[in-house]
Image (cartoon, grey):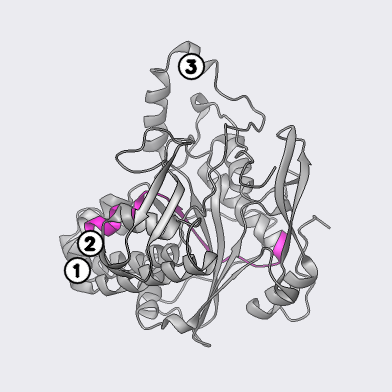
Amino acid sequence: MTSQEQSDPRVGSDQSSAQVQPPLEEQATQQLEVESATPASALEQQPTLRLQAPRRRRRVGRVLLVALLLVVLLLGGGFAYGYYYFQTAIQEPISHFVHPVSRSSEEPSSAQPASGTDITGHAWNILLLGSDNDGKYTFPAVLTQVMMVVHIDPQQNQVFLVSIPRDSWVFIPQVGGMHKIDQAFFLGAIQHNSFDDGVRLARLTVEKDYGITIDRYAWVGLDGFAKVIDTLGGIDIDLTHPIVDDTYPDDVGSGATDPYGYRRLYLPAGPQHLTGEQALEYVRSRHADLVGDIGRTQRQQQVLEALKKKLDVANVIEHLSSLIADLQGKVYTDISEGEMIGFANYGRTLSSGSIHQVTLGPGPGNQNYGTISTVYDPSTGSNQSVVLPICANIQPLINSIFGLGDAESCHVSGG
């Protein structure tokens, strides 16, 4: 069985004991209201406190790569920029998105807050967590379909996007044992139905297993991306070839009926004005690109450039209230308002050539950072297709990008 045929392991949680911290308590209350109206027969079918496997998993690279960086750092910075200069005109401040999460005693010290808006004094490591929140999951117990460490080095004028495959088979600290890394946030969150605990465990897992100190985090939900693009009036993209995908996941959007369903996707070649949903389709599809996964990376870069054109101050300020509403409950971060302004100003001047992407998965030669294999997962009671990280190749890369010297940074097996 391939990794695409495996199910997403997840757990049910007891909403009656929800301890979700502000500003997330409103969502927890809404979920309680929905669950209280659920028939008893349906409640009896809910998963128990054991990792369960739903029907099937979508073959999809869930939440955007470069676009995530854009939404959190550049667009988020646009919010802060407007808030900073037009405080009297803003009804809903950017603080709705700022949600600090305290560090556990096992975590290394993170970078100190920026002085005002100046983020140029040192490099930053930001953990991006991209989660499904489209109805298959009960927030905050969601899997992180994307885990990426964004290394921003203003002094060298370089940004590295280091993606950790969601199926990476790694040791999860505190919980113990080997699990897919996309379960780290989930396993933390279900202990007390706490978003903060999810962030802490995901952050600690990356720090312990890969030796990378995480300075800031940003959690991004899937559907906020499309809403932002619609609010900004769509984007213009020149498609070099058509995108045809016969197994595109039919799990978001107005027409979605089955969270595990598929539909046929077709986007014609040539200049196109894309709505938010179409842009999401354009960057998510990975099955029929003529140049494979490299093509998906190029499409993400296209969307990045198209959105950057929309992010002038006047446009952001004009739509600020709507943009805040679009991302309400879709973005949480501990990047401060001042840091957002600093990252936004830096990001506006950053060329695409300064952004480097690497995925810690299978590849050629010494760029082979993982091996696809099958392991038995006792938490699900089934075999799982996983990516086994290759520390011999990962460690030199991590040490070089993050300036760790000759440190023994890779400990994905918990050693």
Q: Sequence-wise, which precedes: disc 2 or disc 1?
A: 2
In the rendered image, residue 349, in percent from the top left (x then y), is placed at: 36, 83
Q: Sequence-wise, which precedes: disc 3 or disc 1?
A: 3
Q: What element carries label 2?
A: loop
Residue bounds of the magenta highlight: 209-234
Q: Closest to the observer: 32 or 182?
A: 182
Q: Do the residues labelled 2 and 1 touch (CB within 8 Å)?
A: yes
Residue beneath disc 1: 315
Above or below for 51 versus 294: above
Task: Classify mark 2: residues with Cα within 10 Å, few (<14), some (14-19) or many (20+).
Answer: many
In the image, taking residue 353 as reference, residue 362 lies left or right, namely right
Amino acid at dot 1: Asn
Query: In the rendered image, is residue 95 in sight?
Result: no
- Numbered disc in front, either 2 or 1: 2
Q: In which quarter of the image is the C terminus?
A: bottom right
Residue 97 circle label: none
Q: Quadrant of residue 146?
A: bottom right
Residue beneath disc 3: 42
Q: Sequence-wise, which precedes: disc 3 or disc 2?
A: 3
